[in-house]
Image: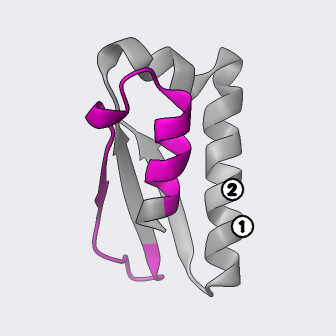
Amino acid sequence: MKELLIAIAQGLVEDPSAVRVEADDPAEDGTVVYHLHVAESDMGRVIGKQGRIAKAIRTVMRSAATKNNCRVSVEID
């Protein structure tokens, strides 16, 4: 899951080397929270107008997690 999020983010930003993903330990309900870090200048590219790209990233991640029988959440820091 972490590799998928990194691949998506690196495709969107101008500085792919600044993309970092940190994963929290699973919560009580089994949800893993992924924290996406990008360069300050690339924040707009990852969030998108009115948060549309961020919402799309979260949707893709939830779909992939459903296929793997797990739950994920994505936070953009």
- The residue at the point 34 percent across, 31 percent down is 38
Residue bearing mark 2: 60
Residue bearing mark 1: 63
Return the residue nearer the eye: 23 or 45: 45
Estimate the x, y position of residue 51 in percent, counting from the top left.
64, 26
Question: What kind of element bears circle 2?
Answer: helix
Q: CA distance from mark 1 to mark 2?
A: 5 Å
Task: Name the image quarter holding the C terminus.
Answer: top left
Return the residue nearer the eye: 69 or 12: 12
Magenta span has 27?
A: yes
- Which of the numbered marks, if any, corresponds to residue 6? none
Question: What kind of element bears circle 1?
Answer: helix
Q: Is residue 15 above or below residue 18?
A: above
Extent of the magenta region: 4-31
- Image mark count: 2
Estimate the x, y position of residue 60 in percent, counting from the top left.
69, 56
Estimate the x, y position of residue 13 in percent, counting from the top left.
47, 26
Q: Amino acid at mark 2?
A: Val
Local packing at callout 2 (Cα closer than 10 Å; few below 14, some 14-19, many 20+) is: some
Local packing at callout 1 (Cα closer than 10 Å; few below 14, some 14-19, many 20+) is: some
Q: Quadrant of residue 69?
A: bottom right
Mark 1 touches mark 2? (CB < 8 Å): yes
Magenta span has 20?
A: yes
- The residue at the point 29 percent across, 35 percent down is 17
Q: Is residue 29 above or below residue 45?
A: below
Q: Amino acid at mark 1?
A: Ser
Q: Is 51 on the left or on the right of 38, as rendered?
A: right
- The residue at the point 61 percent across, 60 percent down is 61
